[in-house]
Image: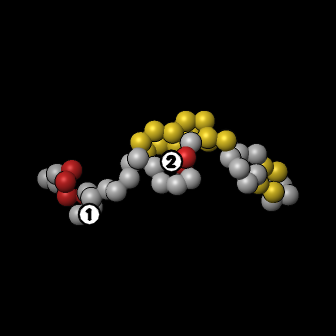
Amino acid sequence: MSKIGDFLPTRAIVRVGVVAFSATAAAELGDYGENPVILFSYGDLPHPFSAA
């Protein structure tokens, strides 16, 4: 029987977090907004999410 540790990576996780964001888009035209609005962020996040 396998243990949960058998499936974990051997390296430590550097950053763990969650980000919820909203972005505007016109998918049929392939046009996507360049500046998504960050609704919620939590944890140790990389840039640009850490600036929120």
Q: Badge 1: how crowded within 10 Å, few (<14), some, or many (20+)?
A: few
Q: Residue at x 82, y 51 (%)?
A: 26
Q: Position of residue 3 (x, y in %)?
A: 16, 51
Q: Secondary structure at mark 2?
A: helix
Q: Position of residue 5 (x, y in %)?
A: 19, 54
**Mark 2 packing: few (<14 Cα in 10 Å), some, or many (20+)?**
few
Q: Quadrant of the C terminus?
A: top right
How many badges with numbers are in the image?
2
The residue under the point 76% across, 45% down is: 24
From the viewer's perspective, is residue 42 above or below residue 32?
above
Residue sitting at the far front:
51
Q: Eyeballing the image, is 19 above or below 13?
A: above
Q: Amino acid at mark 2?
A: Ser
Q: Do callouts 1 and 2 mark residues in contact (Cβ within 8 Å)?
A: no
Furthest residue toward right: 29
Counting from the top left corner in percent of width and height, residue 31 is at: 81, 57
Q: Amino acid at mark 1?
A: Arg
Which one is nearer the viewer's eye here, 27 or 44?
44
**Residue indicated by mark 1:** 11
Please tell me the numbered disc located at residue 29.
none
Q: Which mark is residue 50?
A: 2
- Could you tell whether 4 is left or right of 16 in the image? left
Horizontal arrangement in the rendering, residue 3 relative to residue 16 (left or right): left
Residue, x 52% and y 43% (percent of image)? Answer: 19
In the rendered image, which quarter is residue 21 located in? top right
Closest to the camera, between mark 1 and mark 2, is 2
Work out whether mark 1 precedes mark 2 in sequence or the reverse, and give the earlier one.
1
Give the residue at x 26% y 63%.
Answer: 11
Q: Residue furthest bottom?
A: 10
CA gap between label 1 and label 2 equals: 23 Å
